[in-house]
Amino acid sequence: MSKDPSAIEAQLEATKSGQKGPPPIEQWHPELSGDIDIRIARNGGWYYKGDLMKRQALVRLFSTILRRESDGEYYLVTPVEKWRIQVEDTPLLAHTLTVEGEGQNQNLNLTTNVDEPLLIGQEHPLTVETYPDSDEPRPLVAVRHGLQARLVTAAFYDLARYVVDREAGSSDELGVWSDGVFFKMH
């Protein structure tokens, strides 16, 4: 098969056969097919051979077969192929924070740039790191298969409105509550 995204798309469509939900990529372990010239930019844009992929449906589809493996690399995986791609920061962006409830009973919900809803909680924990050689915060939410979504600046500012001070032994911790879990903001 070629390194053409359309060929990968056709292969995935052929494997669906009435399947609901995301593809079971955790069950797929093909050998490495090689590198494909797909790059996910820091701004969330997906590029093929330097050109922006304009079909959002294709980007959404590819996001469902993307995983990060223990070597730290990102791969598009099908039942028979595995292509390494380049990711500048994180493969997904999280935006549009909505809040249900309040205090320890609140739920913080995000939407990714591929329209995937995420509830910050046990399944999708929040961490706040900083970029290397910088104090710039790097807020991340775990998505699936080793992938993370970085909160865009506006969503991070929205999240900051829900930061509370919590007593933790002899000191205090700043963080947010969501889905019954307290997430520290470092």
Image: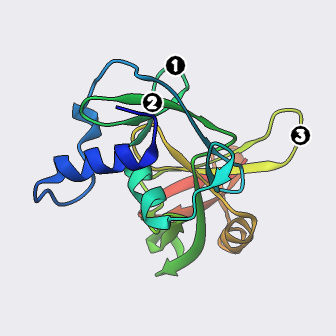
- Count neighbours of disc 3 (C-alpha within 10 A) and say few if under 14, some if 14 to 19, many if 20 or more: few
- The foreground one among 37 and 101 is 37
Residue pointed to by mark 1 = 71
Placement of 164 over or under 80, stated as above or below: below
Instruction: Determine the CA span between mark 1 and mark 3.
Output: 25 Å
| Residue at position x 52%, y 19% in the image | 71
- The foreground one among 81 and 106 is 81
Numbered badge on residue 63: none
Identity, as a three-letter code, of the amino acid under mark 3: Ser
Instruction: Pick out the residue farthest to the right.
Output: 134
Q: Can residue 65 be seen in this view?
A: yes
| Residue at position x 19%, y 49% in the image | 14
- Count neighbours of disc 1 (C-alpha within 10 A) and say few if under 14, some if 14 to 19, many if 20 or more: few
Placement of 64 over or under 155, stated as above or below: above
- The foreground one among 45 and 140 is 45
Residue pointed to by mark 2 = 83
